[in-house]
Image (spheres, rainbow, N blue to C red):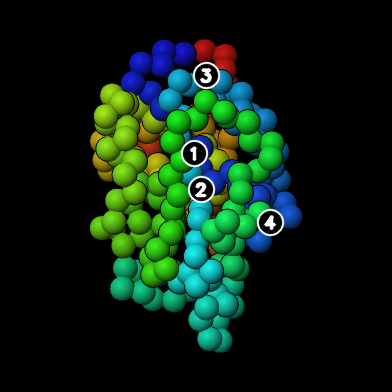
């Protein structure tokens, strides 16, 4: 493919989100070989890594009487409470061992602040705290991004929607993503992405142009 001005963003391919992890997404490990092949087509690859302190606000166990997958209202909006996952420095937070993209230049760690979650690789959930990814992409002359990874309906969707918001021509490669699908969240996420201008493609567009 023509790589001029194009980058691949690989979202949260970590032990915590794959079978055996604290917030495992069914079969999410099966997309990793495809992600590795796709990455081979891109000069610019960015990896994201969910990377929480143990007292993170998104963990149900840090809220008295709350269970995973319940929601709470925070200053910045509704927060889903998750099982504790991807705690900084743990095996759960490490990249999945099958992920093999050694030429990736940048790793964006997100959700690092105790009081703010961050599904998006661009902007934390308060919609005020940037991660620095926009500046990185602009300084490298990137105008088009492709997004893959986990989970389609949370971190992939929020990342893709923010990419559109910040002016990037944005594609999600559907068969290289894995979804949680909590209460029809997957269907809703595709609706939100399409409304924002995210384009939905399959990997063959990249691999067999
Ligand atoms: Zn998280």
Q: CA distance from mark 4 to mark 3?
A: 29 Å
Residue 153 visible in the snapshot: no
Q: CA distance from mark 2 to mark 3?
A: 21 Å
Identify the disc placed on residue 49.
Answer: 2
- Which residue is the site of mark 4? 21
- Label 3 neighbour load within 10 Å: few <14, some 14-19, many 20+: some
Q: Which mark is residue 22?
A: none
Q: Which of disc 1 and disc 3 is earlier in sequence?
A: 3
Are the residues flagged by discs 1 and 2 in contact, CB closer than 8 Å?
yes
Residue visible at 41% across and 16% down? 3
- Camera-near label (3 vs 1) is 1
| Mark 2 or mark 3, earlier in chain | 3
Q: CA distance from mark 4 to mark 1?
A: 19 Å
Closer to the camera in the image, 5 or 180 = 5
Q: Is residue 57 above or below residue 100?
A: below
Task: Write down the residue under mark 1.
Answer: 47
Decide: is 97 above or below 69: above
Asked whether mark 2 lies closer than 8 Å to ligand 1, one says no
Regarding mark 3 in the picture, which secondary structure is present there? loop
Residue 36 falls in image quadrant: top right
Q: Which residue has dot 3 on it? A: 41
């Amino acid at each position: 493919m023509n790589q001029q001005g194009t980058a691949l963003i690989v979202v949260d391919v970590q032990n915590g989100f794959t079978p055996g992890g604290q917030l495992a997404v069914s079969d999410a490990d099966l997309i990793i070989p495809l992600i590795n092949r796709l990455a081979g087509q891109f000069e610019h690859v960015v990896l994201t890594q969910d990377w929480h302190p143990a007292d993170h606000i998104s963990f149900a166990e840090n809220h008295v009487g709350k269970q995973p997958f319940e929601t709470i209202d925070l200053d910045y909006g509704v927060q889903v409470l998750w099982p504790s996952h991807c705690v900084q420095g743990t095996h759960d937070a490490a990249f999945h061992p099958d992920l093999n993209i050694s030429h990736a230049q940048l790793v964006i760690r997100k959700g690092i602040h105790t009081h703010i979650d961050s599904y998006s690789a661009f902007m934390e959930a308060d919609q005020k705290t940037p991660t620095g990814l926009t500046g990185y992409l602009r300084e490298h002359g990137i105008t088009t991004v492709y997004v893959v990874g986990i989970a389609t309906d949370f971190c992939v969707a929020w990342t893709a929607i923010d990419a559109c918001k910040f002016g990037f021509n944005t594609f999600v490669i559907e068969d290289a993503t894995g979804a949680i699908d909590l209460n029809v969240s997957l269907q809703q996420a595709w609706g939100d992405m399409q409304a924002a201008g995210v384009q939905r493609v399959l990997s063959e567009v990249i691999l067999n142009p």
